[in-house]
Amino acid sequence: MIIHGKWLVLFSHPGDFTPVCTTEMIAFTRAHTYFKELNTELLGLSVDSDSSHLAWVYDIYCRTGIKISFPIIADRNGEIARRYGMISSDISNTETVRNVYIIDDRGIIRTILIYPMNVGRFIPEIIRIVKALQMADCSNGSTSANWMPNQPVIVSPPKTYEELIERVSDIENNRNGISWYLSFKELPEKCIDNNCNSNE
């Protein structure tokens, strides 16, 4: 499932009316605004029926007042789940495991996360990954361990000896790295506050 021009977080859950999944549906809904600010849509999936999805979403609304704000695919025959590797034969031949696919605005899968059945997803980390991917694309750099939005990004390593010498001099002058193979740069203005569009 590709939404042209937008990023997509596609996530599967083992089944409707299950406790961990219910907390995740609520958490994704509460964070939906943040994803939209990143030009990112949410799309759930399980092998339950459309009627089951509707009953579950309605039950969540009746009990919490929260309206699930994104669609859920009813993949009854498991075709999509199998295509994306969402079913683990070690656990079940029919239930989808807790997978997350971050797909960019060109339809390319950029990140795959797989969670065990009994551990819920941490939504802020999924948001951080989307931001990191977008910022790395925008700045032509890489993000470091524990990178957070608007922090400097890693500069690509030099490819020639001349570039290496130039990089060493830049680090000495600007104190922006530890060696020629690891230095940093501030985000370009176009990348700050989500102003970058990878299609531009």
Image (spheres, grey):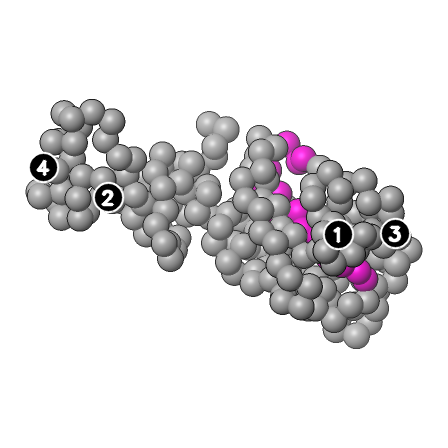
* Secondary element at tag 3: helix
Amino acid type at circle 1 is Ser
The local secondary structure at tag 4 comes to helix
Residue 1, image x and y in percent? 71, 37
Quarter of the rendering containing residue 30? bottom right
Q: Main secondary structure of the magenta part?
A: loop
In primary-sequence order, the first of circles 3 and 2 is: 3
Point 88% across, 58% down: residue: 52
User: In this figure, which residue is indicated by the disc labeled 1?
Assistant: 89
Q: Tag 3 or tag 1, which sits nearer the N-term?
A: 3
- Gap between marks 1 and 4, in whole Å? 54 Å
Relative image position of residue 15 (x, y in whole percent) = 79, 60
Tag 1 near tag 3, CB within 8 Å: no
From this view, report whether residue 125 is shown above or below residue 87.
Answer: below
Q: Please tell me which of labels 2 and 4 falls first in the chain.
A: 4
Please report contact status of discs 1 and 2: CB closer than 8 Å, yes or no: no
Q: Dot 4, crowdedness within 10 Å: few (<14), some or many (≥20)? A: few
Residue beneath disc 4: 169
> What residue occupies the far bottom of the structure in this picture?
63
Q: Amino acid at mark 4?
A: Ser
Q: What residue is shown at x 74% (from left), y 71% (from top)?
A: 19
